[in-house]
Image (cartoon, rainbow, N blue to C red):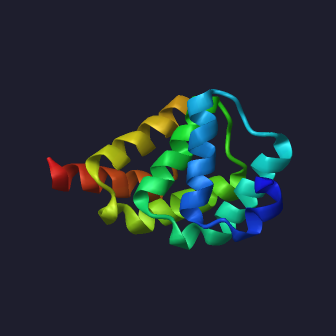
Amino acid sequence: QALAEMRGFNPQDLANTMWAYGVFGRPPSPALLRGVESQAVETMWGFRPQSVANLLWAYAKLGLLPRSTLLDSIQRHAAAEIGGFKPQELAITIRAFATLGIQPSDELVQQLQGQAVVRI
């Protein structure tokens, strides 16, 4: 049912869906995962920091690599909105990249380091 309604999912719905799969420790079906990823790319501008962190946490928990289009979208959005991330959201985001073995973009690394310096 979620797959049929995916086009109506907002960013929090998408993050919550993936978070739930992460909690269960079972990946969604390939079709559902493609739907989440496509909708997330289209609505990334509306993702709040907590939703970004939760989405990445779920991918890391499940050991799934986001498609490159989603990963690029997440990184651009996170770099642009990094000032709105709470310390826990920053930590979750960084840990998810590390867990997945993904080197964040230079832009995102610079923004993350800048926030770390500001908040220490």
Asked if residue 108 can be seen in this view, the reply is yes
Q: Residue furthest left?
A: 120
Q: Position of residue 95 (x, y in %)?
A: 43, 35
Which residue sits at x=53%, y=64%? 76
* Residue 108 locus on image (x, y percent): 44, 56
Residue at the spot x=27%, y=56% of the render? 114
In the image, 29: left or right of 36? right
Query: Could you tell me which residue is drawn at 81 percent across and 54 percent down?
Result: 1
Task: Give x and y (percent) for residue 18.
Answer: 62, 45
Q: Position of residue 68 (x, y in %)?
A: 70, 52
In the picture provided, is 75 more to the left or to the right than 42? left
Q: Is residue 67 above or below residue 100?
A: below
Q: Residue at x 49, y 33 (%)?
A: 98
Front position in the image: 49 or 28: 28
* Residue toward you, 16 or 56: 16
Residue nearest the observer in this picture, 83 or 16:
16
